[in-house]
Image (tube, coloured by chain):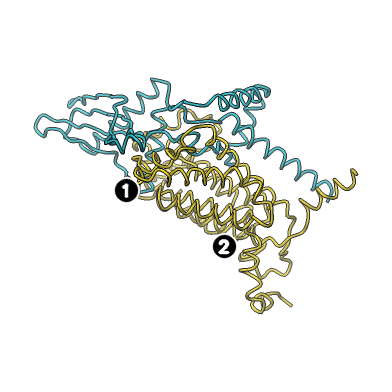
Amino acid sequence: MKTKKILLLAFLFIHVFSILLTNLIGVYPFREKLELREASENTLAVLEKVTDCFSTEVKGVTQWYASLTGITGYGFFSPDPPYSYTIYFKLEAEDQGTSIQESPFLSTEGKSRMTSAFNQFKETKNEDVKNLMAQSMALRMHQLNPSYSNIDLMSMFYIVPSMKEYRQGERPYYASHENYEFIIDPNP
Amino acid sequence: MNTSIFKSIDQFFFKAENNINLAVFRIGIALAAMIILIAQYPDLLEIYGQYGYLRADIVELPLLSFQPRLSWMTDFLASYGFSEFLSLKVLFGAYLSFLLLLGIGVLPSLTALICLFFQISFMNSGQHYIYGVDYFVLAGLFYCIVFPVGQQLSVQFFNKNRKKESWVFYTRVLQIHVCLVYFISGFDKALGYDWWNGEAIWTTMMGLNFRSVDVSFLAEYPFIPKIIGWSVLLVEIGYPFFIFWKKTRYAWLTMTILMHVGIGLFLGLYYFASVMIIFNIAAFGGEWLKGSFFKKKPKFEESLIPG
């Protein structure tokens, strides 16, 4: 009985440690609107120093444990919610003109998950991987719309003005982020 | 001195307590996972298919060789002549069936382990499409493996050797987990400006992804988003402190649940809200649950005890 209690407390220690370290590593995930007061900057600097105390091996094992047990960063919409990010497709064909289309998800849940995919696309730093992702999306749009030969993937932010700016007449607008143009070879 | 510390630790973690909350947790997690899975069904091929919106070989590119993924199973089924769509349907049906077994409490640790394998596989193969709720379902399944979640409200309910009590340790793990979730979330939010001045509520509700109702009128009443923003910070940062204090526990639990109801209704994150409510009720709503299940129906309860 005593051994079981000690083992359970050891499990609790490892579990809580994993939650804390995973969150210290992943603190402050959305860095687009990076305007922090000095106190916040100092707090983050201290947290970074704390995580630096742990070796890469410890961090690796912790992340492996976290991935099996569903532990993740808990900074939802923190510290400031990012602007919405979306992708549209401009499909063109000589005889059919131009059509602007959204991604091909049917369900509400599918559309919610598509938002995660867009954010992944936005945050992918490796240009080769990003190109592959863009190609995959464009190819899927071509499969669904085979008569269009030019496919332009347009990623954009949806900028919401502040409440004050909104009262002064400004309205939300799309700001272009990246464009990928694909021309489908009709005779591959 | 040392003895009293050990006694306090022993009392805090290893007091025997009715574990109805763990049974409710098991049912809630299994049910939520089933609903989330069914909600994805119309886009099954688009999300998880080899030639979906993001091709499986691109999505699975960063995975290490030992990380479970759906293509292991679809490739295996393909060798028996199954098409990809049929294979995905089979895996979908199998996961759903094991979640059902977990929900009704058939060998809960084993079925939870199998469900965890499916959940990780679905998450890895759709890793570009996952969000917070998937991690909480995974954590919930992990707890269903480790915790004694099958002792009540299960098909083993009529078992003569059933125990209605277990160490409070398991509930404490849930409580500490939930406290850390809220404290870290609130702490992160407090680092920025937008939750203090209400812009976070405004930006999120006016954004493209979470806009379910038109709230543009809020620009004329900036104090409303500001109050909501401050309330979220108070509820989240104050959670570990006020939820453990008996006098404020149920007020805090109610406020937290209301916050999630708001997130569900106004941001459209129904599943995330539901799973968080399940975690909250299992962690801190034990007394509510005991009242609901036992005090009001003592005769029914007594009649179920064999002998």
Residue A106 at what x, y percent from top left?
31, 47
Residue B25 at what x, y percent from top left?
59, 56
Quadrant the C terminus of chain A occupies: top left
Q: Residue at x 48, y 48 (%)?
A: B272
Q: The cyan chain is which one?
A: A
Residue A108 at what x, y percent from top left?
35, 49
At numbered mark 2, what does the secondary structure look like: helix, strand or loop?
A: helix
Q: Chain B is drawn in which colour?
A: yellow
Q: What residue type is labelled 1?
A: Asp
Rounded to the nearest angstrom, the CA distance separating label 2 from label 1 is 41 Å
Q: In which quarter of the image is residue A176?
A: top left
At numbered mark 1, what does the secondary structure look like: helix, strand or loop?
A: loop
- Asked if residue B78 lies left or right of residue A145, the reply is right
- State the residue in front, A47 or A132: A47
Name the subunit of mark 2. B
What is the residue that sits farthest to the top in this orientation? A127
Reading the chain from its start, which is encountered first: label 2 or label 1? 2
- State the residue in front, A166 or A147: A166
Residue B232 at what x, y percent from top left?
52, 45
Q: Which amino acid does label 2 sit on?
A: Ile
Residue bearing the label numbered 1: B214
Q: Residue B104 carries which label?
A: 2
Q: Are marks 2 and 1 in contact (CB under 8 Å)?
A: no
- State the residue in front, B230 or A97: B230
Q: Can you say whether A101 is above or below A152 in the image?
A: below
- Asked if residue B277 lies left or right of residue A133, the reply is right
